[in-house]
Image: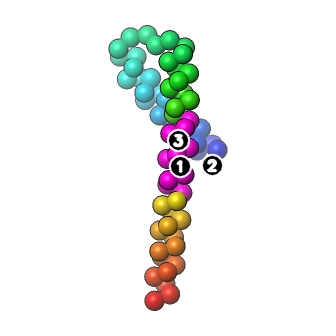
Amino acid sequence: MKKSEKELAANIAGAVQIKLNLTGEQSEKVEKAIKKSAKKLAKKLLKIAEEEHNDSKKVDEDSDDI
């Protein structure tokens, strides 16, 4: 889980940095903020994906009971 979270955060941060680099050079403070926000977003996205996976699994189990 941690590995996929780090990979997702790196991908998000990279994509944002690429877009921002089109506007000019970014300071270290901006890059640090991007990385921090990307980590938070990756964590939230993986949590939501896990919850959806668990919910769909539960629905499948419930439909087997019918």
Whichever of callouts 2 and 3 sits on the residue coming sooner in the sequence is 2
Identify the residue at horizontal 43%, vertical 10% (top origin): 25
Q: CA distance from mark 2 to mark 3?
A: 11 Å
- For the residues labelled 1 and 3, say whether their Cβ atoms are less than 8 Å apart: yes
| Residue type marked 3 | Ala
Amino acid type of the residue that numbered disc 2 sits on in the rendered structure? Met
Q: Which numbered tag is attached to residue 62?
A: none
Where is residue 21 shown, x and y percent of the image? 40, 16
- Magenta stretch? 39-50
Q: Residue visible at 44% across and 23% down?
A: 17
Helix, strand or loop at mark 1:
helix
Which residue type does callout 1 highlight? Leu
Read off the residue under disc 1.
Answer: 46
Give the spatial CA distance, label 2 vs label 1: 8 Å
| CB-based contact (under 8 Å), mark 2 and mark 1 | yes
Q: Residue sitting at 63 percent across and 43 percent down?
A: 3
For disc 2, the marked residue is 1
Residue 7 seen anywhere in this rendered image of the structure: no
Residue drawn 37% across the image and 23% down it: 19
Assess whether residue 46 is covered by the magenta stretch: yes
Relative to 19, residue 52 above or below: below
Which numbered circle lies on residue 42? 3
Which colour style is shown?
A: rainbow
Q: Position of residue 16 (x, y in %)?
A: 42, 27
